[in-house]
Amino acid sequence: MLRIRSPQDLGAGLVFIAIGVAGVYFGQDLTYGSSSRMGPGYFPIILSYLTIMMGLIIGGRGFALDGPPIQRIPLRPISFVILAILAFGFLIEQIGLALTTVAVIFIASAAREKFNVKETVVLAIVVAALCVGVFIYGLSQPMPAWWGR
Amino acid sequence: MDAFSNLATGFAAAASFQNLGFALIGCLLGTLIGVLPGIGPIPTIAMLLPITFGLDPLSSLIMLAGIYYGAQYGGSTTSILVNMPGEASSVVTCMDGYQMARKGRAGAALSVAALGSFFAGCVGTIFIAAFGPPLAALAQQFNSPDYFSLMLLGLLMAVVLAHGSVIKAIAMVIVGLLFGLVGTDVNSGAVRYTFGVSELWDGIDFLPMVIGMFGIVEIIRNLEEKEVDRTAISTKFRDLWPSASEFAQSWKPVLRGTAVGSILGILPGGGAVLAAFAAYTVEKKVAKDPSRFGKGAIEGVAGPESANNAAAQTSFIPLLTLGLPSNPIMALMMGAMMIQGIQPGAAVMTSRPDLFWGMVASMWIGNLMLVVINLPMIGIWVKLLSIPYRYLYPAILMFCVIGVYGTNANAVMMILTAVFAVFGYIMVRFGCEPAPMVLGFLLGPLMEENLRRSLVLSRGDPMIFLQRPISLTLLICALGLLLVIVLPNVRKSREIAFQEGG
């Protein structure tokens, strides 16, 4: 019976295999060409197979060598941080930087267990003012300060 | 002497009012963020990259270099005062620096670190001025096969000398190479792996990737850890000078550290972290009484701090002369240069001498600024430490996303950032560092192009890589390196080098 001795290695191996397989699968329509005339698919396909090979070796080690366990992944921080990034992308053109900042700060602050509304309001206002001042007036970055542009 | 007239050109370019200003801003911003806990130089540079894009290439590079040194300087300050390394290369400084601070010699530790760094920085600058041109001249003789072999060797060295699992790092490099190929193939015009997303036709953008994998992942990781108490040991300005005996104890370690750092910095993958660890080991070996280390030996601060700064300088050499980023920070620099429309490599020195020499000169100026400006400002930096992370990270996150969006105002970029953040996070949990992937990502298209050209030259015969002497030599080195890491006792000493005192 195979026993998983190093879950980190096995996990990494599986990810690499998946990437390699995806590389081969989605690259199958690309012309491979020949060595003297490399097509657009030549190098990617070689790399994809190399990735699969590395994945097999690393994943195989997961059964052969002892390794540390995978740390528990607390879902709260990662989900709120990712949500904040996506929210920025969808809101910025709609409501402008000032209000987007407030929204992002609120979502980001919720990534911690202890969420303090009062503190977050103050923080949101300060950061929003700072961002609008620095990035729009100072560095003239290409984004609206307010809605309706 | 040629090098001196070149350096003079450089100083003329770097000492313009505007560039001095950007060097200063870079140093201050770098120190500011380097002092803040939980943000190392890589996320710092990634986050501040976008700010520099509006500038002309030289100013932008000067500012970035300033941020880099500043972040390192800030990192050593927190190591000494709070026992919290702001970044990996200051981990060593913690061991003796913090102990010195507890004995009331914080000022001495800080100033020895600063002066040692400055001295190392001067030597590093001379190193670049001396070794840059001959290396670049050598690189001019390189042909496609040689470049391909060079990149192979460089990537291999980068994973061997960096810490973490070698085999996983190699896999990450390959994945990075693959990601680097996404987008339109320059040769055939075929679109690769874009999944119908037109934003990917020009390839995956550099910023969403580095910000996602370094900046955002760092935030998430910090959030998972408990907030630690960060009370700094207070220092007064008048305590800043080392006593005569401390000075006498530290000048030799500074010299040794500088030598170790300068050499390790040039090697791909070397960089500041390895240099600091190696210098600490050297100091411990040559010390009459090694048991003092870890209890506040000033040599344990002077050596590594000089070494990491020397290495930080000389690691620019492979990038500027061969176009080879030797560590993740150099990869960011390379990314910045490419966004500015400069392909780093030997050609820069001949086509834009002002850029090359200006940057070299600015490194020295930046180091001087750090000593002059920052020592008196230590009090302010320390105050910054008391800002709790819960106020910092939402703002940092905000700067990260604005940075990505500011260079490419498109919601798809935010999705890319999120995707890379999740991917980077998962890989970290599986024990794979994201840094090698970024190196591969930048070199992917270059390797493909050089491979293609080589094989066209040889009509498809792969033996061309063994027939050209330069390429053959590089490949033999690469093979030797591979053999060496497979040998068990070398592997063991590599692990020890990174774990020393850990």
Image (cartoon, coloured by chain):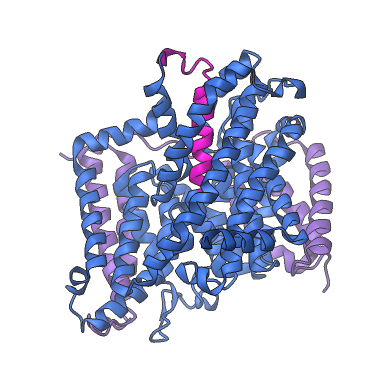
Chain colours: A purple, B blue
Is A92 placed left or right of B102 in the picture?
right
Q: Residue at x 45, y 40 (%)?
A: B261
Q: Overall secondary structure of the magenta stretch? A: helix
Q: Position of residue B217 (x, y in %)?
A: 54, 47
Is A106 placed left or right of B253 in the picture?
right
Q: Position of residue B24 (x, y in %)?
A: 73, 50
Q: Residue at x 62, y 15 (%)?
A: B102
Examine the rendered structure and indicate whether residue B260 appears above or below residue A43. above
Q: Residue at x 48, y 48 (%)?
A: B425
Q: Position of residue A146 (x, y in %)?
A: 84, 65
Examine the rendered structure and indicate whether residue B119 appears above or below residue B215. above
Does the magenta portion include B253? Answer: no
Image-quadrant location for residue B34: top right
Q: Is residue B385 in view from this perspective? A: yes
Which residue ends up furthest to the front in the rendered image? Answer: B1
Number of numbered discs? 0
Q: Is residue B49 in view from this perspective? A: no
Does the magenta portion include B306? Answer: yes
Q: Position of residue B72 (x, y in %)?
A: 59, 41
Q: Nearer the viewer, residue B169 or B10?
A: B10
Image-quadrant location for residue B449: bottom left
Q: Residue at x 23, y 53 (%)?
A: A56
Image-quadrant location for residue B361: bottom right
Q: Nearer the viewer, residue A90 or B189?
A: B189
Q: Nearer the viewer, residue B34 or A92?
A: B34
Examine the rendered structure and indicate whether residue B407 appears above or below residue B247. below
Quadrant where the C terminus of chain B is found in the figure: top left
Give, as a single range, the part of the protein colored magenta. B289-313
Is A86 placed left or right of B344 in the picture?
right
